[in-house]
Image (tube, grey):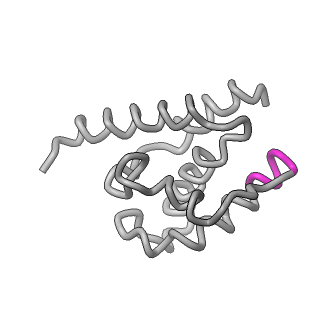
Amino acid sequence: MEKPSTIATEAKDRLDYIIQIGRVDLYKPIHIAEVLRRSRLHQDINVSELESFRNPSLKWRDIVTQLLLSKKPTSSARYQHDVWNESAMPPRLLFGQPWYIVTPLMRKKRL
């Protein structure tokens, strides 16, 4: 089992990379942040169980992006689910504060 500090570093590095390569609207970082927010506020999903949030999280992300950006993603569901792949942000790395995601997003979008 990996040390928590190693997992935290890996998660931060992957999130930094996702933000860096993200398209203009950064739908994937918003998607990750919304899953984390939902897991803490509503406690109705288990972030270690992908199937508990994979499909519902698309709707949550769309609501947030509509509010923030006045639009929502038009890419395929397959592309949108890629955010949870092992090479991106697998569920085993989901923890921490959603604010780590929101702060760089606000800087990049100048919100």
Q: Residue at x 75, y 58 (%)?
A: 74
Q: Is residue 28 magenta?
A: no
Instruction: State the image quarter where residue 102 is shown.
Output: top right
Q: In the picture shown, does residue 67 fall above or below 14?
A: below
Of the pair 48 and 81, the residue shown nearer to us: 81
Q: Position of residue 23 (x, y in %)?
A: 67, 37
Q: Position of residue 101 (x, y in %)?
A: 56, 38
Count of marks, rendered view:
0
Q: Position of residue 104 (x, y in %)?
A: 61, 29
Q: Is residue 4 left or right of residue 96?
A: left
Q: In the picture shown, does residue 93 fall above or below 99?
A: below
Give the residues drawn in magenta, as a range: 64-70
Q: Residue at x 35, y 64 (%)?
A: 48
Q: Residue at x 41, y 37 (%)?
A: 14
Instruction: State the image quarter where residue 8 is shown.
Output: top left
Q: Main secondary structure of the magenta part?
A: helix
Q: In the picture shown, does residue 108 fall above or below 49?
A: above
Q: Residue at x 56, y 64 (%)?
A: 78
